[in-house]
Each structure stands twice: as C-alpha cells, then as structure tokens.
Image (cartoon, rainbow, N blue to C red):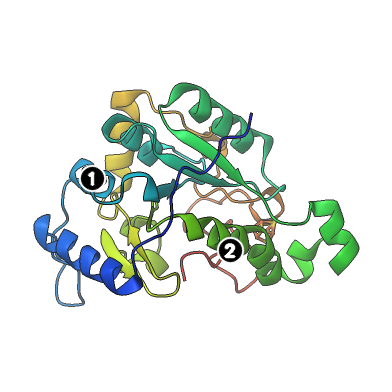
Amino acid sequence: MTAQITGRSPLRSAAELEEIAAAGIAELGIVNPTKNGPGRDADAADVIAWAAATFGPTWALTASMQDTVLAHLVARVAPGTDVLFLETGYHFAETLATRDAVRERYAVNVIDLRAEQTPAEQDEAYGADLFASNPDLCCLLRKETPLDEAMENYEAWATGLRRAEAVTRAGTRQIAFDARRQRVKIAPLAGWSDADVAAYVAEHDVIVNPLVAQGYPSIGCAPCTRKVLPGEDARAGRWAGTAKIECGIHR
Ligand code: SF4
C-alpha cells in the first residue's frame, strides 16, 4: 500500500519560517561556510532532532535511494518521518529495490511522488524520450513539479546534499531558508566527507544501492546516468554529454 503524506495545514508563513531557520542556526551554533572559511556544522543527529522538534509532521526527507545514510539516521533520531521518493518511472531496478528495502527495514514513512503523466502518456504528449530531447522539461515534469506539490504539505524539507559531492554543492548549508519554495531546507550531512559516509555505512549496516559498487557513484534515472570512468568527477555520469548538471530541485 502506498504511504500517505502526514503533513498538516495550515502551515506557518514564509516570514515565520525564515525566522525559525535563523533561530535554529543560532540554537545549534552553526556558522555557515563563506569564501573566507569553512564555517562550523552541528552534529547531524542534533540537526535532525531540531527539525523533528520544530516541525513535527510538517517536515520530510527527500531520498534518492543511493546510500540511504540520511534515511537511516532519521529513522534512528525521528522515527515515523516522511521520506519522499521521486518515482519518475525511469529508475534502475536496483534503485526501486533499495527504496523497497528502506520501506521494509527503516522506521520511516516512504512515500512515492509521481508525475501527473506516466512515461507513456508523456511520450504521447511530447514525443518519445523527452529525457533526451529536453531533459530540463522532463525533470520539471517528473521531479520538480511533484516535489513542489508535495511541499504544500510541509514547512521544511531535508536532503542528503553534501558539500564534498560536487562544486555545485560547495555552498550547502545545514539549515537555510529556501526562498524559491518558501520553506526551510535542511542538509544535516552538509559537511560529511565520502569517508564519513563510508564509515557510517559500515558501522550501521546501511542499505546501499548495489549500483554504487558497480561504478555509479551518483545515481539518477537510468536513461540519464552512466558509469563513471576512472579519474572522472563523481557526478560525471549524470546527463553525460549535455550541459545539465543538476535536476533542478536544488536550485
Ligand atoms: S533525470 Fe532524466 S529521466 Fe529522470 S526526470 Fe530528469 S530528464 Fe527525465
């Protein structure tokens, strides 16, 4: 059975949420990184505990079902939290199996977010393989819009973004006000290195998408993800051969 969103309304105003984000940064002693220095992060578990206490059922985690570290940590610190999975209809079978395993093993509420159209209906409307002809539109229809609609139920959303993942993510903050969505955006693992992730996975027997070990350090939809070659950037396999480097949900 598909899990239901547990958020509630009415939500607090954007101005209130911006104040709450600032208060959280101060309470947790976070110093945001700048070009002059790396700043100071709070413990990831403390950030999650703050989010749970501050937002109750009105925060959710988005998960790509790659290494599932954040979902595991959230299940430990704030069991029952909604975990949003963008079910684009184009995922690898291994990614869907990872989602199923998280749903089975972790104490979180995994919710599939789907686009209005099935892939077949999208092919009918826009021509076959929109991901090849216009990946920005495909991501808008299958990722950004379903997430934006789901976020109408939440005051805050958390992601597994890490500064070490890519140059485009170097400015990631643990707590920020997401002006585009008018919500609080939380990245508890912002300062974690690849070694930190590997250590947590080993210590807690975390579910990891088997594709990671097969040469896919960054996993998105199957048509837009290829293996990474030795020496390439971890995200080089995403939308390879195009100028696109992010799906748009983190703009
Ligand atoms: S990653 Fe590719 S298949 Fe997935 S939504 Fe974006 S363009 Fe479409």
Left or right of 20, for residue 185: right
Find the distance from the CA under tag 2 to the CA under tag 1. 27 Å
Q: Classify mark 2: residues with Cα within 10 Å, few (<14), some (14-19) or many (20+).
A: many
Quarter location, residue 198: top left
Instruction: Say which residue appears at 67% left-offset and 44% top-offset.
Output: 91
Residue highlighted by disc 2 = 144
- Tell me the tag on residue 104: none
Q: Residue 58: percent from the left, percent from the top?
A: 38, 50
Q: Secondary structure at mark 1?
A: helix
- The residue nearer to you, when weighing 39 against 237, is 39
Residue 83 at x, y percent in the picture: 46, 42
In the picture, measured across the screen, residue 76 lies left or right of residue 115, that is left
Q: Horizontally, is 168 left or right of 43 in the view? A: right
Give whichever of 241, 82 is nearer the camera: 82
Residue 244 percent coordinates (x, y) = 59, 70
- The count of marks equals 2
Q: Name the N-terminal-most of marks 2 and 1.
A: 1
Ligand 1 lies in quarter = bottom right
* Mark in the foreground, 2 or 1: 1
Give the numbered dot on residue 53.
1
Disc 2 residue: CB within 8 Å of ligand 1: no
Kindly indicate the quadrant of the structure image that contains residue 25. Answer: bottom left
Secondary structure beneath label 2: helix
From this viewpoint, is residue 146 visible? yes
Tell me what residue is drawn at x 22 percent, y 63 percent: 20
Q: Are marks 2 and 1 in contact (CB under 8 Å)?
A: no
**Residue located 34% across and 55% down the image:** 162
Residue 16 appears at what percent x and percent y?
A: 27, 69
Which quadrant of the figure contains the N terminus?
top right
